[in-house]
Amino acid sequence: MSKRRLTQQQRVRIDRNQAQRGRRMSTAAAAEKQINTESLGPQQSGIVICHYGQQLEIESSAQETLGKVYRCFQRTNLPALATGDRVIFQADSETTGVVVALQERSSLMSRPNQQANLRPIAANVTAVAITIAPLPEPFPNLIDRYLVMAQYLGLDAIIVLNKIDLLDAERDAGLEQSLANYSRIGYPVIRVSSQTGLGLVELKEQLRKETVVFVGQSGVGKSSLINSLRGGLDADDIAAVGGLSLARDKGTHTTTAARLYHLPGSGDLIDSPGIREFGLWHMTPQMVFDGFVEFAPYRGACRFRDCKHESEPDCALRQAVEAGEVSQQRLNSYFFLLSSLEI
Ligand SMILES: Nc1nc2c(ncn2[C@@H]2O[C@H](COP(=O)(O)OP(=O)(O)O)[C@@H](O)[C@H]2O)c(=O)[nH]1
Ligand SMILES: [Mg+2]
Ligand SMILES: [Zn+2]
């Protein structure tokens, strides 16, 4: 079975989102009133490239209007849409329209909003590029948190170390050691500098044919990397760097909404805002365990079936740490993520 199918949990979540939709109905209904139904054009396919407030930016994938962007509202019978969603829309002017249907998703990344409701942020993603840098210094456990999420959603994960022009052998020794461990357990680690261009060819090669979402702390250079990867761009078509708007969005939107960009001759890139509170909501301890891929050989191998891998005798996982097969740092991180579950 495809790893990328929606999991049971995601379906439950989607159902819940649809239930929540009812509460948003009144504002959405008001928005729908603005749609001029008489002037609607034919149905055409498109992709959500950005979603903010009640508005969506839909890029046409239809032959006649390929690449044209329409500002759209969505029909109230649709669930909340996310950047990357493939939709059917109808234009009602040269620049505006209405989304009338959502096509099936192969994956859905969500995160809680301020009210702790899950909001979809990126759909049909195939890979996560976990971006870190020597500065700002990586938050502890952040990489592992994203890796657990990627595993849970069935997505490829790569680790991108940006700003290698700022590496300092002494200060960053711990970082290097931890990256070596991620390589060892099978994750691609790509070292780049969006500033000098070092490593960009390798990164581009790694992302070929993927729809990749860049995640990571604010300031690590996600937007800069996306701009560098895409190369030679018009000033009105670049991702805002340093949280400052450069063009198209004139201010507020880019820092809060995920946006999709095409990489010529390759896949798509989604720039996401700094995702600080990327919680591992609703996950069971087993799901967290399964998110630590190198723990797999030790699953069920401890003396006690319900071993917590803390101080029980004959714990296979702790023996693996002692034997140097599993890193102590990852085991600590596993405990930390477990303790952060809302259960
Ligand atoms: N030295 C250096 N600075 C970088 C590099 N990439 C990005 N930056 C800077 O880091 C800051 C944050 O970049 P930005 O792309 O907005 O990060 P984001 O918040 O992850 O999207 C900006 O001031 C960039 O100029 C790099 O490779 N080297
Ligand atoms: Mg950014
Ligand atoms: Zn154990």
Image (tube, rainbow, N blue to C red):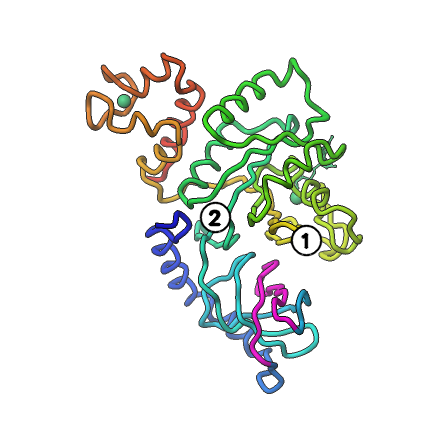
Distance of label 1 from label 2 (alpha carbons): 20 Å
Picture quarter with the C terminus: top left
Instruction: Name the image quarter holding residue 202.
Output: top right
Residue depicted at 40% across the width and 14% down the height: 324
Instruction: Name the image quarter holding residue 60.
Output: bottom right
Q: Is residue 62 magenta?
A: yes
Residue depicted at 67% across the width and 78% down the height: 93
SS at mark 1 in the image: loop
Residues packed near mark 1 inside 10 Å, few (<14), some (14 to 19) or many (20 plus): few
Mark 2 is on which residue type? Arg
Residue position for label 1: 252
Residue depicted at 62% across the width and 38% down the height: 218
x and y percent of residue 231 in the render? 75, 46
Residue depicted at 67% across the width and 32% down the height: 192
Image position of 67 with respect to 132: above or below: below
Image position of 8 with respect to 101: above or below: above
Residue position for label 2: 111
Q: Along the horizontal axis of the image, is 79 left or right of 179? A: left
SS at mark 2 in the image: strand
Give the main secondary structure, helix, strand or loop, of the magenta stretch: strand
Q: Along the horizontal axis of the image, is 202 left or right of 87? A: right
Is the CB atom of the residue marked by disc 2 within 8 angstroms of ligand 2's nearest atom? no
Bounds of the magenta span? Answer: 42-63
Is the CB atom of the residue marked by disc 1 within 8 angstroms of ligand 2's nearest atom? no
